[in-house]
Image (spheres, rainbow, N blue to C red):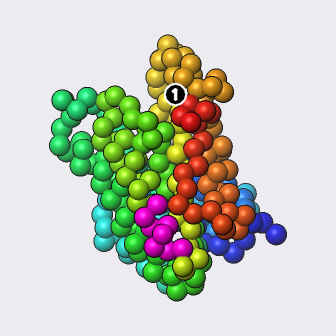
């Protein structure tokens, strides 16, 4: 039997890249997936999972709209009976040096990357507490651990997720709910493929393993933390960065 057979997993930002890889990996391990994104792209993700014999559905939700996020969680519980795994992956970047950063760019990044995780997690925790089982995984970033020039808003939001997860891990441990963080380094996604080869080479020089990671490698870490094999792990940051930050 697969390690997540019978579990219900919600993955935000699941339309592409890391989020899509997480949704597909959890489905392969037997979970029923609710793939969440702002646009329609998760329909193709859910179709692909079902075509491969898995169980999945798509949900078009703007995670920065608290009411919509709460309604999604309520609907999942009503129809599917429970929520077992929540992966807070949705995120955006609006990079700029602080001296030039607009307040709306700060607010947008924090709202998507951090505040939405608060809203969705709060709604998911209620059914998890009742069933006395749950796995919450937040996707942070190496930037939230070590900082990066031009990303004050992004770094703050990703560092905030780490503090949020550690505090929540202490609150929820008595109910057998674990809360952990995966912090990716440079990962080979559409975003990083858009940079020049010169910049990519400079970035790779900072990584002891000498290469970018893959979305599947992040998905493997998330899958582990969502499984029973990680039942005694909570409040931790699993850094998947090729040794870039130690």
Residue 151, image quadrant: top left
- The vertical placement of 216 against 95, above or below, is below
Residue at the far top in the pictured view: 198
- Specify whether residue 44 is in view: no
Q: Which residue is pictured at 38% across the width and 31% down the height?
A: 148
Q: Which residues are magenta?
A: 166-173
In which quarter of the view is residue 216 placed?
top right
> Which secondary structure class fits the magenta region best?
helix
Q: Quadrant of residue 95?
A: top left
Decide whether residue 172 is among the magenta residues. yes
Q: Residue at x 61, y 33 (%)?
A: 243
In front of the other: 160 or 118: 160
Residue at 30% across / 41% down in the picture? 153
Residue 39 magenta-highlighted: no
Q: Which residue is mark 1?
A: 193
> x, y (%) of residue 67?
31, 71
Q: Nearer the viewer, residue 193 or 51?
A: 193
Quadrant (top left/top right/bottom left/bottom right) for the N terminus: bottom right
Where does residue 244 sit, x and y in percent of width and height?
Answer: 56, 31
Q: Is 34 or 137 nearer to us in this picture?
A: 137
Q: Position of residue 16 (x, y in %)?
A: 52, 46
């Amino acid at each position: 039997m697969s390690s997540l057979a019978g579990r219900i997993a919600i993955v935000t930002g699941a339309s592409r890249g890391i989020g899509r890889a997480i949704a597909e990996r959890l489905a392969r391990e037997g979970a029923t997936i609710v793939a969440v994104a702002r646009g329609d792209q998760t329909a193709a993700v859910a179709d692909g999972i079902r075509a491969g014999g898995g169980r999945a559905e798509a949900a078009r939700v703007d995670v920065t709209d608290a009411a919509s996020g709460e309604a999604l969680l309520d609907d999942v519980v009503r129809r599917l009976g429970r929520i077992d795994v929540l992966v807070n992956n949705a995120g955006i970047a609006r990079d700029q040096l602080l001296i030039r950063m607009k307040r709306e760019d700060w607010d947008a990044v924090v709202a998507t990357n951090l505040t939405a995780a608060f809203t969705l997690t709060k709604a998911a925790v209620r059914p998890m507490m009742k069933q006395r089982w749950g796995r919450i995984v937040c996707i942070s970033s190496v930037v939230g651990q070590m900082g990066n020039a031009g990303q004050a808003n992004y770094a703050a939001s990703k560092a905030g997720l780490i503090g949020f997860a550690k505090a929540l891990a202490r609150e929820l441990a008595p109910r057998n709910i674990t809360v952990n963080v995966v912090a990716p380094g440079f990962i080979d996604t559409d975003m990083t493929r858009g940079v020049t080869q010169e910049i990519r080479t400079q970035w790779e020089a900072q990584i002891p393993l000498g290469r970018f990671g893959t979305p599947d490698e992040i998905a493997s870490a998330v899958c582990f933390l969502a499984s029973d094999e990680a039942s005694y792990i909570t409040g931790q940051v699993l850094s998947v960065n090729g040794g870039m930050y130690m």
